[in-house]
Image (cartoon, rainbow, N blue to C red):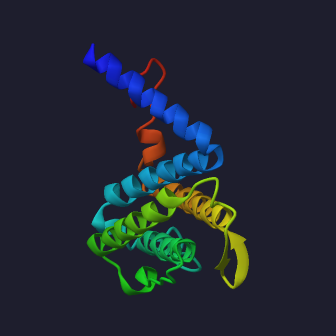
Amino acid sequence: MKSLIMLTTLAGASVTAFAQNPLTTELKAQYESSKATITKSAERMPDSDYSFKPTPTNTRTFGQIIGHIADVQMNLCGAVKGEPKSSDAERSKSSKADLTAALKESFDYCDGAFGSLTDANATQMIKMFGRDQTKLGALYFDVIHNTEMYGQIVAYYRAKNMVPPSTADRPARGGNKK
C-alpha cells in the first residue's frame, strides 16, 4: 500500500511540474536523455580508443569530441547562469580519465542551469556568442549540440564495431534488452 501511495504522489508531482512549466519540463527531459547517452558513451569507450579517428585528417579523435562537448557546455551554461565560463578540455586533455572528469564537471555545472530554468524565466535575455539569446534558446542549443555530437559518437562506435548506448540499452521487441 505504501508503494502505491508513493507512486501516486510521485506521478502527481510530475504532472504538476509539467503543467506549471511545460516548455522547460520537455527541454529538461531532452537534456537528461542526451546527458545519459553521452555519459555512457564516454564511459564505455575503452581508454585506448580515445585517440581513435575514423580518417587521418580533418576529424576529431573520440576524446576530442568528448572534450568539445564539455567545453561547449561550460560556455553555454555559464552564459545562462550569468557566469562566463570557459574550458579547454578538447585541446588540453587526452586520457579517458581526464576527459570523462571534464564531461562530468560540465554536466554537473549545466544541471544547475537547467534546474533553475522555468517557463517564467525562459525568455530572459542573455549574451551567447556575442548576440542576444533567451535562456531557453541557449539551453535548447546545448541539447541540439549534444545530440549532434552524439551522432558523431555513434559513427565512431560503429567504426570500432561497437554498439552505441542508445541501441545497446534499448529494449528489444518483447521487452528484453539487446
Where residue 36 sits: x, y (%)? 42, 51
Where residue 155 sits: x, y (%)? 54, 57
Q: Is residue 62 above or below residue 15?
A: below
Q: In the figure, residue 146 lies in which quadrant?
A: bottom right
Q: Is residue 143 above or below residue 57?
A: above
Residue at x 55%, y 63% (from the top left corner):
149
Does 55 sit left or right of 132 as displayed? Answer: left
Residue at x 44%, y 74% (from the top left corner):
67
Q: Is residue 141 above or below residue 58?
A: above
Where residue 177 sits: x, y (%)? 39, 29
Question: In the image shown, does 82 or 63 lie closer to the viewer?
Answer: 82
Residue at x 33%, y 55% (from the top left corner):
44
Q: Confirm whether residue 176 shows in the render.
A: no
Quadrant for the N terminus in the image: top left
- Residue farthest to the top, as pictured: 1
Residue at x 40%, y 56% (from the top left corner):
41
Q: In the figure, residue 26 lies in which quadrant?
A: top right
Quadrant for the C terminus in the image: top left
Question: In the image shown, does 95 or 48 lie closer to the viewer?
Answer: 95
Q: Is residue 3 above or below residue 87?
A: above
Q: Confirm whether residue 79 shows in the render.
A: yes
Total tally of numbered discs in the picture: 0
Does 92 sit left or right of 34 as displayed? Answer: left
Does 94 sit left or right of 25 as displayed? Answer: left
Where residue 58 sits: x, y (%)? 59, 79
